[in-house]
Amino acid sequence: MTATPSRPAAIATEQIRNARTVVTEWRFPPGAETGWHTHGHDYVVVPTTGGELLLETPEGERRVPLAPGQSYTRPVGTAHNVINPTGQEVAFIEIEFL
């Protein structure tokens, strides 16, 4: 995952890694992005802040509202660039199933 020169990189802090799961906290300062990537595992996202994310996907852009504690899941193979288009930090916990 590589951020574009015009955007700062989102901050990933791995919290747990074992034979079954990887748990990562993602923090997005205003304007930050993950860079384009494809998920190699099924995963769950647990928002820890409210806000909105902009997803660049092969099918086009879409905006996703976040509410603290309202989890969602995505399958292996999901490809996107995740961007914080807001003026406030956005954060979530990502749980990957290995």
Image (tube, grey):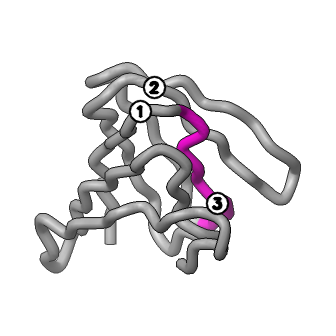
Near mark 1 (Cα within 10 A), the count class, few <14, some 14-19 or many ≥20, is some
Q: Nearer the viewer, residue 91 or 15?
A: 91
Q: Residue at x 22, y 66 (%)?
A: 13
Quarter residue 11 falls in? bottom left
Q: Which mark is residue 81?
A: 3
Q: Which mark is residue 88?
A: 1
Whether residue 19 is visible, yes or no, is yes
Q: Please say if 77 is above or below 2.
A: above
- First to last magenta residue range: 77-86
List x then y, in percent, for residue 71: 36, 31
Kind of element beneath mark 1: loop
- Magenta segment: does it hold 84? yes
Tell whether label 1 touches label 2 (CB within 8 Å). yes
Q: Nearer the viewer, residue 35 or 74?
A: 35
Q: Please say if 88 is above or below 78.
A: above
List x then y, in percent, for residue 70: 35, 23
Q: Amino acid at mark 1?
A: Gln
